[in-house]
Image: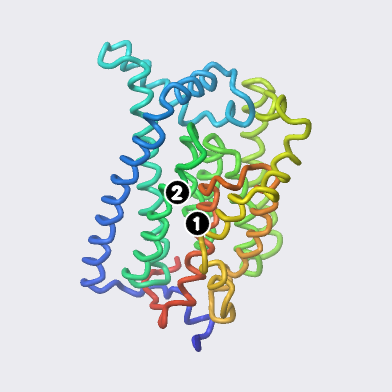
Amino acid sequence: MNQSANSAQPVAGVGVAPDEVRQDRAALLVIAGLCIAITLAYLDFVALRYADRRFEHHQLIVQGEALSPYRYRVLLPWLAHGIASAVSRWKILPYRTTVGGLYVAFTGIGLTVGFLVFYLYMRRWFPPQTALLGTVYLCALAPFTFLYISFTPWAWWDLAVFTAGIWMAHEARRLSLLCLIIGGSFLRETTVFLAILYFLGRRGADPPRSLLLWTGLYGGSSAAVFLGLRFALGWAPHVGQAEYANPVFHRLVYNVTHVMPALTFVIFFGVLWILAVKELHGKPQMLKNLLWFIPIFLVVHLFGAHMNESRYYYEIAPIIMPLALMSLSPRRTAVRGAG
């Protein structure tokens, strides 16, 4: 590619042509339709198939008896519990039926918000067709993420949280990012990664003092939620602690000795891994900075998760996808303001 780094950046004040507005509306409708189909697949492949196990996990969380980290991922279980309790008191639907339906709804909403936000995020750099291509690619992989899981309602919000967080960091919307990190930390503790992503993305763009202060505030806020929930709900043993002599190294050994973790790594982004690091000289500096997060992401998950669960890769999709498509797109069009 022969374009300079400056030409890869969106230009403030650039308008959107009427035909692109129509294309955006059509793209958003396409994505919404795909999300309905994906949610129906989730209902059949996961929600109905593991209904008893899912309700048991829900009860353990709302009763404060689940293992770590599930005991502390309280936002959706408490919300489901509150709504279902009210519905049950009003004798509209049984508590369990309402809980089951709400988790499917939360999944559908999380997926829809995530893919729609991702499309709009991609429009910072790409015309509608290219932005839709990247989003539909991720939609196509959604059923793949349903493997190896039974109850992870918070997982389907990762794309929304990480895309919005990276976008806010790009545009220096610091207070909005702070609110997202605090709220997201009640959803899932990995929201703390947004503090690292802010630091990496803004490095070189912000004064060092400001960069360190905001990074510390983000990390400290997430840590405060992390510790506050543990003091409020009690310190629970980590999942797997009773089953494995060393749960951390057990996961590492599993990830390096089984086929599916490596195969999942290759399948999820495929050739996009390579395209993302090609021709970096012509790509936005903030996105290039975020590539340093990839080894952090991989090391943390190799030790802390079973990497045959492909859902984790949605956390880095806002980094890999735009960089990869910039290597495929013959011309990157400025379509959104940066302010």
Location of residue 236 with respect to 38 vertically, above or below = above
Contact? badges 2 and 1 (CB < 8 Å) = no
- Residue at the far right: name it: 245
Secondary structure category for the residue under label 1: helix
**Quarter of the rendering occupied by the C terminus:** bottom left
* Residue at x 53% of width, y 62% of height: 319
Circle 1 packing at 10 Å, graded few (<14), some (14-19), many (20+), is some
Give percent across and percent down for residue 113: 37, 48
Q: How is the image coloured?
A: rainbow
Circle 2 packing at 10 Å, graded few (<14), some (14-19), many (20+), is some
Question: Where is mark 1, residue-wise?
Answer: 168
Give percent across and percent down for residue 112: 35, 47
Secondary structure category for the residue under label 2: helix
Give percent across and percent down for residue 211: 66, 59
Single out the mark in the foreground, 2 or 1: 2
* Amino acid at the residue labelled 1: Met
Location of residue 284 with respect to 199 vertically, above or below = below
- Residue at the far bottom: name it: 2
Q: Quarter of the image holding residue 201?
A: bottom right
Per the rendering, the mark at residue 51 is none
Question: Where is mark 2, residue-wise?
Answer: 144
* Amino acid at the residue labelled 2: Phe
Residues under labels 2 and 1: Cα distance?
Answer: 28 Å
* Residue at x 70% of width, y 56% of height: 212
Foreground of the two, 148 or 227: 148
Foreground of the two, 107 or 285: 107
Going from the N terminus, do you reach mark 2 or mark 1 first? 2
* Residue at x 65% of width, y 29% of height: 239
